[in-house]
Image (spheres, rainbow, N blue to C red):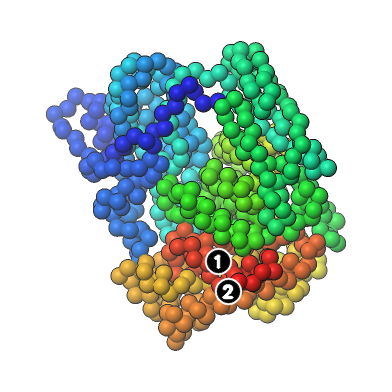
Amino acid sequence: MLAPNTINLSTLEWTLLGWRPYSWLYGRTMETNLDLKADIAPIPIQIPGSVQQALLDAGIIEDYNVGLNSRLCEWVEHRHWEISTVLPPIQTGPVVLKAEGLDHSGWILVDGRVAAEWSGSLVRHSFDLTEELADGQSHQLSIVFDTPPEEQGQIGFTSRTKHFKPRYNFSWDWCPRLVPIGVSDRLELQIGALDYVIGRLYTRLAEDNRSATIELKIECFQPTEVLFQDQKRSLPAGEHHLQIEAQVEPWQPNGNGEPVLYDLAINDQITKVGFKRVRWLPCLDAPEGAEPWICEVNGKPTFLQGVNWTPLRMDYHGVTREQYSQLIGLYKEMGCNILRVWGGAFLERSAFYELCDEAGIMVWQEFPLSSAGPENNAPTDPSTIDYLVSIAEDYIKRRRHHASLLMWCGGNELQTNLEGKDGTGKPLDVNHPCLSRLAQIVKKEDPDRRFVPSSASGPRFTAKRECFGQGLHHDVHGPWNAEGDWCEYWQSDDALFRSEVGMPGASYASLITNYCGECDPLPVSHHNPYWQHLSSWWVQDAMAAGLSLEEYCSKSQELQAQVLGWATKQTKARFPGIGGMIIWMGHDCVPVPVNTSVIDFEANPKPAYHALKKAFTGIED
């Protein structure tokens, strides 16, 4: 329940100041003749929003999506940034500042004095400011962001991960380095005491696909009347478990029927809920002991088809509901019934989940771990594991009520080599201390949903043709290119699930010329700084030789469509011998010239999108 009065702080006017580290504190707390000034004078900033976007809007930095400009923005990481607003008078308490997303650590100030500190990008924060604010006076509220931690990008050592600020921002094979700073989600002041808070909310569907149960855990801080749907309950202080029965229509995934949602009323709060029943069954002729990869939804075995979902933008703080809606609409039309939210990023926003609920698209949500190349082992340090488990617990509590949520996963490509040492080849399992703890928190907080320790999972990370027929390929990743006789490869495949399959395809030539800035996009080559900066893993030098930019882009897109369309058609024909196929990747967060995405930075579908739509749905545009 919300407090009696809530101030949405995004409705207030905010200003941004840029300081050399700790200069803001020195000038406010010490007797000095110095008149310390911020390096960057006050400019407006939107909340939610990032420092980088505010600086771009003010003309202080260049557009980091153009050419090599992202390199020119890295100085922003080396300042302390202060955002400030003036609060209206608050007469009484308690007064609590609630923050859904703050990057990454820093200080809360009231009238220039430090009132609280925080650390952690991926968990919610709450600050009791009653003493500072509940006096009937107007006050200045400031949030000062410390310099970001030095997290690893794509190449590094996964076991050394400890900060859990989204790693993709520190550079990946499909994006440069851009580390946003700011407020990334809701920010509000709650004024007054809570009567109660809602804990777990579970929905369950019986085998008849009609009879449903809604279970609610609620903690009352004082005797409280609660209207749960049409049932009024008078509850004493303490913890209570409420349950109601209902007759419903099931929530169906895209392609199986309608994703029916219902309004669940708890006093003046309305939550959208849906009812689905999921079982995991073994694939046809699966090796003994293999994990089940046939997803049965409401009694119907369902081939899981979709894309890997990566963030919409490098600077994700200001992503709008409309941007989410545009892409999720495209994926629904494409025939997707699942999106895998990749572990190198973050818990996707509530808008994403709400739109997936409405679209009938199920969500595979990973916890914030990902491979790092030389060493892909999950952390073993007890304090790091404790911190990661606290993040996972917060993830679960925020999203478990959504009908679209299908499963949880420990992370992306967590593995050792086949001898159990550093490297690649063998996915980690729940015997690893970190993944064991994550499995336990899922079982405790969301027991009805599946947990898998890693994607890929099973005996082998990837499927090699020389190992086909040996029962080694359960959930596998790759290939990400057309390797050798790729038609024969897909005809011989024996994997039980494919949660990552990709093929590079260039963006449209018009997008490349619009965003290359002063860079010359020709030649298409690893030796061209523009291509090296944004697409070094995916440049198709040999294909591009002697071609104009337009000819190369067309040829690259045509091959991507051909390979992904063929591979998906062959894979889907094997069902129920295989449970599904998820394409790497869906869309670009940067205007890269070439990548494995099937939708470009401006949300334009590539030809591969249409080939996949035909393979997924049988419908040809």
Q: Nearer the viewer, residue 191 or 42?
A: 191
What's the mark number on residue 560? Answer: 2
Residue 392 x/y as whole percent: 60, 39
Residue 412 located left or right of residue 170 = right
Q: Are marks 1 and 2 in contact (CB under 8 Å)?
A: yes
Q: Residue at x 69, y 37 (%)?
A: 446
Q: Secondary structure at mark 2?
A: helix
What's the mark number on residue 153? Answer: none
Q: Secondary structure at mark 1?
A: loop
Q: Residue at x 33, y 54 (%)?
A: 73
The image shows residue 491, relative to residue 389, as above or below, that is below
The image shows residue 502, relative to residue 548, as above or below, that is above
The answer to whether one can see residue 271 in this image is yes
Residue 571 x/y as whole percent: 73, 68
Q: Residue at x 26, y 34 (%)?
A: 24
Q: Kindly give the residue lying farthest to the left in the view shown.
A: 33
Q: Amino acid at mark 1?
A: Val
Residue 198 located left or right of residue 320 = right
Gap in Å between the C-alphas at discs 1 and 2?
A: 9 Å
In the picture, residue 584 is in which quadrant? bottom right
The answer to whether one can see residue 410 in this image is no
Residue 206 x/y as whole percent: 81, 39
Q: Kindly give the residue lying farthest to the bottom in the view shown.
A: 546
Q: Residue at x 76, y 50 (%)?
A: 297
Q: Identify the residue under disc 1.
A: 598
Lower position in the chain sequence, tag 1 or tag 2: 2
Q: Nearer the viewer, residue 190 or 591?
A: 190
Q: Nearer the viewer, residue 3 or 478?
A: 3
Q: Kindly give the residue lying farthest to the front in the view shown.
A: 230
In the picture, residue 503 is in which quadrant? bottom right
